[in-house]
Image: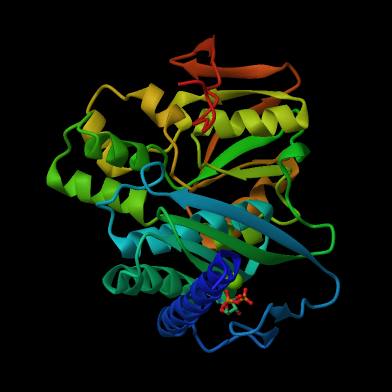
């Protein structure tokens, strides 16, 4: 046999082998998808869900689509010790929180999952955490991708908002009041505890870790803000950073009153008499909504949020003068806006 012919046969055998491996891995891949991610579509607007080359969804008339995508990487957004159910929950929760900040009602999601190995115990926990939250908010997982590589989760959500009603960062105007839902700093305390930077009593630790691992997206509050809020953002990178983003986008400044910033009972117990404002203002991961409302809308806002049982606190005012200032015990200081976590910052 000529050496060229031998090489050709070898290449053919390799190709046949690769094809078999591919089929085997494809069978395995589709089995995993079926086992862990195939749910019956509950939404009538899902025309074609998981199983085809693409999902087909049918948005109602007069609605804008709001899309948001986030990636969670092992070692950056969670550690190898994080409970897979918490990872599944958080992957969806952080995206839903973005929709909440836009005033959108979540509808559909897609998931690109990269796994080092087909670890079924991990997939079981992860998919349960994700699908339970999806169920809670009537979101249908309509497609995705499954590949092998370092653990990484990319989740996209698409939501609906009546035409022209999405709430943006650029809508804040001087004179508007600044509000925040819930409490801030809890997730930051939880993170500090996991990094051994703080010691928390067991009860406070449980609460702060719950806030860090299982954020509850403020969807209902976001919907209530339609037509009321001038601008909104969710607190993912820290109150000062995220407020700074509203100010930048809107071309305004702001003053906040530290005494107005809502702290949980756990955070107050941890801080005792000495609140760590640096942590409260700069820690991320709280996924509360931060938004502005013109004075004329405040009564409606309060009525709506009381009805939803959503706590809301007035923390300051939007001002014409650029920059962010804070008042502590009647004295006003300039607040350096932290830039938040930068994945590409020079190390
Ligand atoms: P294709 O090769 O045509 O992209 P795949 O074999 O990757 O199709 O996926 C088959 C079906 O399963 C598609 O409908 C896809 O959207 C869905 N799917 C794949 N991975 C996931 C996942 N992790 N979660 C949900 N659906 C998935
Ligand atoms: Mg694919």
Residue drawn at point x = 61 percent, y = 55 percent:
69
Observer-nearest of 260 and 296: 260
Percent position (x, y) of residue 213? Answer: 34, 53
Left or right of 52? Residue 173 is right
Q: Is residue 134 visible?
A: yes
Q: Is residue 138 above or below residue 197?
A: below
Residue drawn at point x = 40 percent, y = 30 percent:
280
Percent position (x, y) of residue 262? Answer: 42, 38
Percent position (x, y) of residue 344? Answer: 54, 29
Determine the residue located farthest toward the front in the rendered image.
Answer: 1
Percent position (x, y) of residue 165? Answer: 79, 57
Residue drawn at point x = 71 percent, y = 34 percent:
176
Q: Is residue 27 above or below residue 87?
A: below
Q: Is residue 174 above or below residue 132?
A: above
Q: Is residue 137 visible?
A: no
- The quarter of the image holding the C terminus is top left
Observer-nearest of 309 and 88: 88
Label tally: 0
Q: Quadrant of residue 4?
A: bottom right
Observer-nearest of 124 and 284: 124
Q: Is residue 205 above or below residue 55?
A: above
Observer-nearest of 306 and 199: 199
- The quarter of the image holding the N terminus is bottom right
Quadrant containing ligand 2: bottom right
Colouring: rainbow
């Amino acid at each position: 046999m000529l050496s060229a012919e031998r090489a050709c046969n070898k290449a053919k055998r390799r190709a046949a082998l690769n094809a078999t491996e591919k089929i085997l891995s494809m069978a395995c891949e589709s089995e995993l998808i079926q086992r862990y991610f195939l749910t019956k579509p509950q939404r009538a607007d899902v025309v074609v869900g998981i199983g085809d080359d693409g999902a087909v969804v049918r948005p109602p008339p007069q609605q804008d689509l709001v899309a948001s995508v986030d990636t969670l990487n092992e070692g950056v957004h969670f550690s190898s010790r994080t409970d897979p159910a918490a990872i599944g929950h958080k992957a969806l929760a952080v995206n839903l929180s973005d929709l909440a900040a836009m005033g959108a009602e979540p509808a559909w999601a897609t998931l690109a999952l990269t796994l080092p190995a087909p670890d079924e115990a991990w997939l079981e926990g992860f998919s349960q955490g994700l699908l339970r939250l999806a169920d809670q908010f009537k979101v249908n997982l309509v497609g995705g991708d499954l590949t092998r590589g370092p653990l990484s989760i990319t989740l996209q959500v698409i939501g609906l908002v009546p035409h022209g009603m999405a709430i943006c960062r650029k809508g804040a105007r001087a004179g508007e009041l600044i509000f925040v839902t819930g409490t801030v700093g809890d997730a930051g305390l939880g993170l500090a505890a996991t990094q051994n930077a703080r010691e928390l009593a067991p009860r406070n630790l449980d609460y702060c870790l719950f806030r860090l691992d299982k954020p509850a997206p403020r969807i209902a509050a976001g919907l209530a803000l339609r037509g009321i809020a001038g601008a909104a953002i969710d607190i993912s990178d820290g109150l000062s950073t995220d407020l700074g983003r509203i100010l930048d986008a809107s071309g305004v400044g702001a003053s906040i009153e530290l005494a107005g910033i809502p702290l949980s009972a756990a955070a107050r117990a941890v801080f005792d008499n000495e609140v760590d404002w640096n942590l409260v203002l700069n820690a991320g991961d709280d996924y509360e909504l931060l938004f502005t409302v013109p004075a004329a809308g405040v009564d409606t806002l309060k009525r709506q949020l009381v009805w939803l049982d959503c706590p809301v606190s007035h923390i300051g005012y939007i001002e014409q003068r650029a920059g962010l200032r804070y008042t502590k015990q009647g004295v006003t200081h300039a607040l350096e806006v932290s830039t938040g976590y930068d994945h590409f910052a020079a190390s």
